Amino acid sequence: MSGDRQLEPEGLGDHVDRLYRAARGLCGSREDAEDLVQETFATVLKKPRFLRSEDDIGYLLRVLRNTFFSQRRSAGRRPQSAPLPDALDLLEDPRAPQPEARLASAEVYTAISALPGDFRDALIAIDVLGLSYREAARALRVREATITTRLHRARQRIARWLAAQEAPDAPSDSQRASR
């Protein structure tokens, strides 16, 4: 194992925020994202991990994605339970400075989680985690040009989705024409 180095468990705490933001983009909900990050760390800490480069966050992002997809596959095999009613979700997030900001970020995370996998991964890597295009390309194992294209298309889809969320209040073209 020449050139390999062991991933230091003590240094994992430095990446919690970035992994949480990536998990929030994948899952769409705060609770699921927290569980995903916890499960990712449990997976990484089960045994010593040896890396070929200094790219801890890239490795952790791959483990996070693999954990997410594994959980999705196994959840697809289980019987589905009915979701809890929205009326029970009355607890306010004490860290959110304004309820409007919390709602806006929840809409964005919902939109991100609805993206196709390749677009979602590129958007999370660049916009949520703050990786450079080169780091994102290395972490996702694609070319930088591919990251650029996927990121552009993902941002377009998010913008269209958010515009469609605001559109129900505005009159449609057919309603304007009938006036």
Image (cartoon, helix red, strand yellow):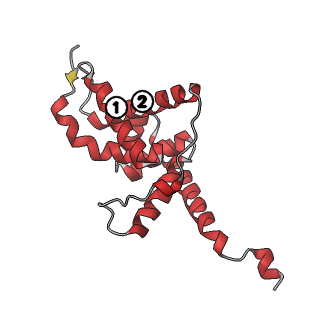
Dot label at residue 94: none
Helix, strand or loop for disc 1: helix
Helix, strand or loop for disc 2: helix
Judge from the rendering whether residue 147 lies leftward or rightward of residue 54; answer left or right. Answer: right
Q: Residue at x 15, y 33 (%)?
A: 10
Q: How far is mark 2 from mark 1, CA to CA?
A: 6 Å
Residue 85 visible in the shown view: yes
Q: Position of residue 49 (x, y in %)?
A: 26, 21
Q: Quick one: 29 or 16, which is closer to the camera? A: 29
Residue 108 visible in the shown view: no
What amino acid type is highlighted by mark number 1?
Thr
Residue to which mark 1 is pinned: 40
Q: Position of residue 132 (x, y in %)?
A: 35, 48
Residue to which mark 2 is pinned: 67
Asked if marks 2 and 1 touch (Cβ < 8 Å), the reply is: yes
Q: Is residue 153 above or below residue 168?
A: above
